[in-house]
Image (cartoon, coloured by chain):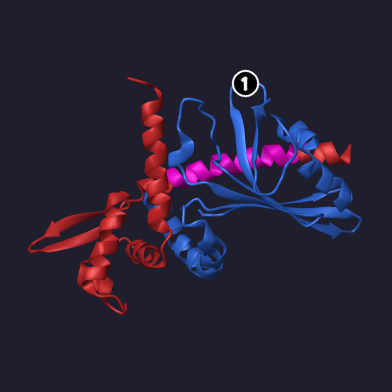
Amino acid sequence: MSSARPREREIERRAVVFAALGDETRLSLVGKLSKGTPQSISELARGSPLTRQAITKHLRVLEGARLVGSVRVGRESLFELRPEPLKEIQSYLERVSEQWDHALARLKSFVEE
Amino acid sequence: MTNIIERRIELKAPVSRVWRALTDHREFGQWFRVKLEGPFVPGEVSRGQITYPGYEHIKWEAIVQKMEPERLFSFTWHPYAIDPDVDYSAEPATLVEFRLEPKGGGTLLTVTETGFDAIPKDRQFEAYRMNEAGWTEQLQNIDRHVKRTA
């Protein structure tokens, strides 16, 4: 009904994405998945001190932020990166940066007057 | 892509002049384009009304964090809060820091905005320091991936 609703959802979603990425373990999972090949929990756990359960928990958080999706191959679930939310937060940061560029240009002419 | 916004700018004005432009609420208001209700006081909420043409309906609200004369001015706020109908409290508050350094008679100003991932404030500084190397590397990976799949 209200036009504000979709924007509020957008903000919440973005906060969830930033929060999901604000953790070293999850960031490293995203890094592993960014190679592009869908991977199983065992593959993701390889070389990591974390248990499969711990990795599963982190993957759920990433799924909640829609950063990761799973595909079923036979009896196994493979996880893959969904880049859309990353693109969203990237363009958001670009918009905020642009505001700073404008504000700082005004500050420059203000103090150099 | 990165989780920190950083800008460096050299200003042809002494540090004392830049400090005044940043921390005197009337001067800040002139270049930032906001009419502030009162002076900046660390620990207190700063309120005002944006004066930028087309955005006059937007309220300014920030919490002043640090004022270390001619070195550091910082506040927390909700960035890009341009829709008056939206409740931005769901969005993580970010920390904006202005750092000043004298440079050849002028001033090197570094502005950073951090905290987009809403980790608890008391952990913010440490966590960023610790994560920085990891971030850079991982984000390059992500970036490459995003570009490839774009």
Residue A103 counted in the magenta span? yes
Where are the magenta residues, as a range?
A88-106
- Kindly indicate which chain is depicted in blue in the rendered structure: B
Check the image and report above or below for B11 versus A30: above
In the rendered image, which quarter is residue B77 located in?
top right
Residue B31 percent coordinates (x, y): 76, 34
Element at label 1: loop
User: For this view, does B122 lie left or right of residue A70?
Assistant: right
Residue A13 percent coordinates (x, y): 37, 42
User: For this view, does A30 lie left or right of residue B40?
Assistant: left
Check the image and report above or below for B104 versus B85: below
Residue B32 counted in the magenta span? no
Residue A101 percent coordinates (x, y): 67, 41
Name the chief secondary structure element in magenta.
helix
Q: Is residue A94 visible?
A: yes
User: For this view, does A45 lie left or right of residue B38?
Assistant: left
The residue positioned 77% from the left and 31% from the top of the image is B30
The numbered mark 1 sits on a residue in which chain?
Answer: B
The residue positioned 69% from the left and 49% from the top of the image is B42
